[in-house]
Amino acid sequence: MFITGPKVVKSVTGEDVTVEQLGGARVHATKSGVTHFVAATEDEAMQEIRRLISFIPQNNMEEAPVKPCTDDPARLEDALNSMVPDDPNKPYDMKNIIYSIVDDGDFMEVHKDYAKNVICGFARFNGRSTGIIANQPNWLAGVLDCDASRKAARFVRFCDAFNIQILTLVDVPGFLCGTGQEYAGIIDHGAKLMFAYGEATVPKVTVTVRKSYGGSHIVMSCKQLRGDLCYAWPNAEIAVMGASGAVGVLEAKALKAIEDPEEKKKFIAEKEAEYKDKFASPYQAANRGYIDDVIEPRYTRARIIRGFEQLQTKRLTNPLKKHSNIPL
């Protein structure tokens, strides 16, 4: 797929490019984001289409599909208690958490090879079709950049359009910084994700797994952005920024005055621990009403299902208008 073929490109820009390089399946699946799924054969593609259709209703007036569930809704997953590293800077695969909590480990990822720092896809909880958006610490530490923000925003709006409840798994250190992102309009793209979550009227459950910092906390279906139920794991950090960055800003003068490296290291460690306890703890967030409950990881599946069951009678309408003005 392309707007203009290789010959036209050659004559206009002088660029030599093959058909595959310009508009092949892999190109659109990894670079442009135009392609959501790639299959090796036509039979495989048809199977993927059938699987996709099983998660979505026939039209926007129907409720999301519900299938009989043989996976215990109250199932506890002990492995979740040790799945996230104690070191907040160490990566792990968020998909392992997803496979552990969804019905029968069945998860259909959308845009699998594009903007891999955020995961989007369909699964079921107690048989009910659910859209999942999750940060991926294994790729760019799970930060939000322009592509990831657009990818997640489009998926949120798709789920909302077809009455599919949304689960958000959060482990996000922030937005990707730098001139490349700023010049590409990351403020606009981040606003798309914030707008999508804010306007979505379907049931929304959020679980903060490890980190949720600053502006990225706001756009990942937080309580302040009309998230219905927000849970956090005990070691989660919810704050304006990470402890090391905060200490560098708040204690800049004190750090300059300390010359001994060992003394400075000890001072930083003490202040980081104090910051985490006073400001970044999930219990502090719960105390302020930003988190509904701090849950043990092994109970995550049961609490998600219970939360969605509570929200099935949710009725929310947005202000009457001709159409919304999402930041495009």
Image: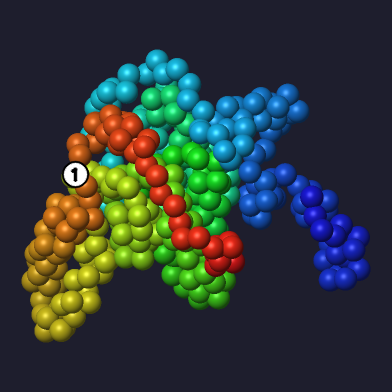
Can residue 265 be spotted in the picture? no
Residue type (three-letter) at the residue carrying disc 1? Val
The residue drawn where x is 67% and y is 51% is 34
**Callout 1: 10 Å neighbours few (<14), some, many (20+)?**
some
- Outermost residue on the front side: it is 320
The residue drawn where x is 9% and y is 69% is 267
User: Which quadrant does the C terminus fall into?
Assistant: bottom right
Question: Residue 163: x, y in percent?
Answer: 50, 40
Q: How is the image coloured?
A: rainbow
For residue 322, above or below residue 90: below
Can residue 126 be spotted in the picture? yes
For residue 212, above or below residue 62: below
The residue drawn where x is 33% and y is 32% is 309
The reply, left or right, for residue 253 in relation to residue 15 is left
Question: Residue 215: x, y in percent?
Answer: 36, 66
Residue bearing mark 1: 294
For residue 123, above or below residue 265: above
- Outermost residue on the top side: it is 70
Question: Residue 68: x, y in percent?
Answer: 45, 17
Say which of 157 and 269 sits in front: 157
State which quadrant residue 276 falls in: bottom left
State which quadrant residue 198 falls in: bottom left
State which quadrant residue 297 falls in: top left
Count of marks, rendered view: 1
Question: Residue 95: x, y in percent?
Answer: 42, 37
Say which of 60 and 101 sits in front: 60
The reply, left or right, for residue 73 in relation to residue 38 is left
The residue drawn where x is 36% and y is 58% is 225
SS at mark 1 in the image: strand
